[in-house]
Image (cartoon, grey):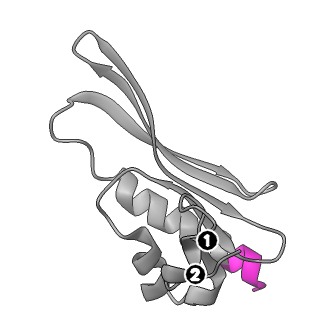
Amino acid sequence: MDKIKLYQKLIVNLLEKHAAVLPYNMQNVENQVIADKERNHFQLVTLGWDGKRYVHSVVFHFDIKPNGKIWLQANWTDTDVAAELEDLGVPKSDIVLGFQPEYARPYSGYATA
């Protein structure tokens, strides 16, 4: 299996794992995994109603760039999903914390671009 297809599978499995856990304080929401494998964009989105308030929130957003690196574009949790990718076998050199400013990335321990 080539690297991009492997990374697609790992990301989708990771998002599905997190999607199975619903917010305990919002009973009428659902988690959706959005996977665009043709363009390599992957998200976990929470949506639904919290009382009278509509919820539509991106929890995680990953992109796989043509060079084969995984860019973590958003992580609105306290979960270290970059470390979870590492545990699945993705080397730090293939993970970019895209939500970090470019000047701070060299200090993250992950790839800079």
Say which element carries label 2: helix
Q: Is residue 111 above or below residue 27?
A: below
Quadrant for the C terminus, please: bottom right
Residue name at image x 46 percent, y 74 percent: 82
Mark 1 and mark 2 lie on one chain; the one further toward the N terminus is 1
Residue name at image x 65 percent, y 75 percent: 7
35 to the left or right of 44: right
Q: Amino acid at mark 2?
A: Pro
Single out the residue that lies furthest toward the left. 25
Between the C-alphas of marks 1 and 2, the distance is 27 Å
2 to the left or right of 112: right
Occupied quadrant, residue 38: bottom right
Occupied quadrant, residue 4: bottom right
User: Which residue is labeled 2 in the image?
Assistant: 106
Image position, residue 67 (x, y; %): 82, 77
User: Which residue is labeled 1 in the image?
Assistant: 9
Q: Is residue 50 above or below residue 24?
A: above
Q: Which residues are magenta?
A: 1-6
User: Magenta: predominant secondary structure element?
Assistant: helix
